[in-house]
Amino acid sequence: MLMAKDLAKMSKKKKLHFSLLDPDKQKPDVAGSIAKTAEEAGSSAVMVGGSTLISQEQVDETVKAIKDNSKLPVILFPSGAKFLSKYADAVFFMSLLNSRNLGYVIREHVKGAPFVKYSGIEPISMGYVIVEPGMTAGKVGEVDLVKKDDIETAVGYALATQYLGMDFFYLEAGSGAPSPVSDKMISEVKKNIDIPLVIGGGIRSAKVAKEKAKAGADIIVTGTKLEEEKNLKKALSDIIKSIEE
């Protein structure tokens, strides 16, 4: 399975939506149910990860429940090497580029690389940058947040990601952020790179998702929305339809 190439090709044909599930936010059976709904709504993949995880078992059980209930590819979004799972299809082998902690930039990757090799899950390289306000991800990741209006720095990180040969660039404001990455920042970043641009954090409505997609996001990620929405299928369907228009 060459998921990175497939997703990149798909993102050039249409805007994609990924559902992000945090094993610390719901029990595995609930995660499985959410994944099933996400698949029915038209999501392209399920990301699994979070900033406050306690054990690998949490991740394993969540991934297994998702696989039991959905055919969507499961991509790990790990905060560290100890939160990898052999049951996933792939892992975003991502470097938190604006972290002050070398662990999040490269050292956790060194620890986790043998697991990735011998488990057979596909590594998908990604440059990951957090913008103000950053929320929990910014605090836990010990990040020097990119200012909301610092377009030049965001573009620099994006270009560095591409020049380092990474597959994707992920720019986010943090899960649960009151406001997402600005349209202007998204637009300028997209103008300067050829690899897929992933945007997440603070995207709670179809209107906002459409704005980010029009600005240049190739992939929209929603996470907190999945935890809060009562009529999840309709909410996700509306978001996915809006970004595909």
Image (spheres, rainbow, N blue to C red):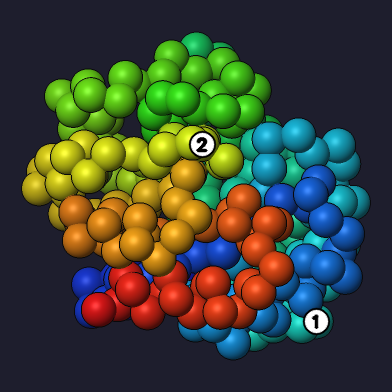
Q: In which quarter of the image is residue 38?
A: bottom right
Residue 141 horizontal/vertical position (percent): 58, 23
Identify the residue position indicated by label 2 in the image: 177
The vertical placement of 106 against 176, above or below, is: above
Which image quarter holds the C terminus? bottom left
CA separation, marks 1 and 2?
Answer: 31 Å
**Looking at the picture, which amino acid does disc 2 mark?**
Ala
Image check: 226 left or right of 215? right
The residue tagged with tag 2: helix, strand or loop?
A: loop
Indicate which disc residue 153 carries.
none
Residue at left offset 56%, top offset 28%? 135
**Looking at the picture, which amino acid does disc 1 mark?**
Asp
Image check: 68 left or right of 184? right
Q: Nearer the viewer, residue 179 or 19?
A: 179
Q: Report whether residue 120 is seen.
A: no
Residue at left offset 38%, top offset 70%? 16
Identify the residue position indicated by label 1 in the image: 68
Residue at left offset 86%, top offset 37%? 54
The vertical placement of 71 against 74, above or below, is: below
Residue 188 horizontal/vertical position (percent): 13, 41
Residue at left offset 37%, top offset 79%? 241
